[in-house]
Amino acid sequence: QAKSLGTNQVCFFDPELQARLQERTQLENDLGQALEERQLFLVYQCQVDEHGDTVGAEALLRWRHPERGLVSPAEFIPLAESRQLIHKIGLWVIESACEVLVKWAQQPALADLTLSVNVSPLQFQALAFVDQVREILSRTRAPAHRLKLEVTESLFVDDRDDICLMMEELKNLGVTFSLDDFGTGYSSLAYLKRLPLDQLKIDQSFVRDLLESSTSSAIVASTIALAHSLDLDVIAEGVEREDQRAWLLEHGCRRFQGYLFGTPATLDEGDLIQR
Ligand code: C2E
Ligand code: MG
Ligand code: MG
Ligand code: MG
């Protein structure tokens, strides 16, 4: 294009970048309709104990785009966050999880399972968040103590009192907290003293090369020890191989999630229960 101007003018028009920006904007607009159009849905991945019995699941969001097919949450969650859509979507996730918990409560084999949902740090910026969760819990009559909110360290970077307060209020409703992707953030460990956490979730990046990297194995062993000494549960995510499971178990980790036990699936595809 620059050439066709026929001069030595500099032209910054980059068709590839332009196309990518356009696609992003289009996707953002589409995401605004995705809930109403029923294109969002949840898949569930089991979490197992040391015997391989399912003790819970994590709900993971999926978007079936009418033209593009399945879009990864790694791609569309950041879009939702940049457009404030995350509040509506996040509440829909929590409400859907609560409805599942109510169904499970009616089946003896499922009644004890916990259900984890991912919560974006941005959702804590809405002052109404706690009230909205309270309202969902009371309307659905879901067993709150079976609902686990997965938060990430980025929530604690600023060490804000109001975040701590909101977490305390949510705890009072009965819900529990898991710290997702532990060890990948940039926050200090000081928050572990102040925040009402229940579980540390070892990030899959450390699990992946656990048996090949002495750094990863040191980090994982320390995380398990830290969890135990702080009286927190600990779960490893991204467990794909039996040797990883064996190593983790040997070092005191008794909760696992990963392809070794099950891939995320809709409930009717149902490979949740491994008993
Ligand atoms: P996450 O919460 O850390 O979820 C774990 C991710 O690892 C999931 O990717 C899961 O499908 C994948 N995974 C599970 N087992 C294995 C394994 O054995 N090996 C490997 N390589 N990967 C495994 P997914 O579903 O693509 O989600 C990616 C991220 O998107 C999540 O990471 C979470 O941060 C975010 N996300 C997903 N659903 C939601 C949601 O409802 N709300 C928010 N705010 N974020 C969400
Ligand atoms: Mg998670
Ligand atoms: Mg994670
Ligand atoms: Mg992760």
Image (spheres, grey):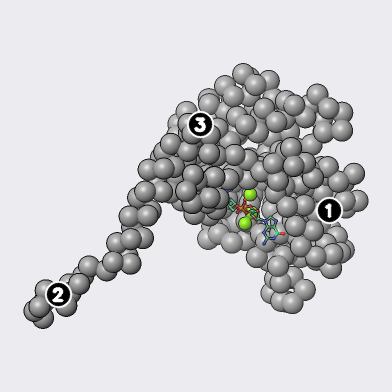
- The residue that appears at 14% across and 75% down in the rendered structure is 4
- The residue that appears at 79% across and 26% down in the rendered structure is 105
Disc 1 element: loop
Q: Amino acid at mark 3?
A: Phe
Q: Is residue 265 above or below residue 162?
A: below
Q: Which mark is residue 254?
A: 1
**In this rendering, position of residue 262 left or right of residue 76:** right
Residue found at the very far bottom of the displayed protein: 8
> Callout 3: 10 Å neighbours few (<14), some, many (20+)?
some
The answer to whether mark 3 is within 8 Å of ligand 1 is no
Give the labeled residue for mark 2: 4
Q: Which mark is residue 129?
A: 3
Q: Amino acid at mark 2?
A: Ser
Disc 2 element: helix
> Callout 1: 10 Å neighbours few (<14), some, many (20+)?
some
Relative depth, front residue between 85 and 207:
85
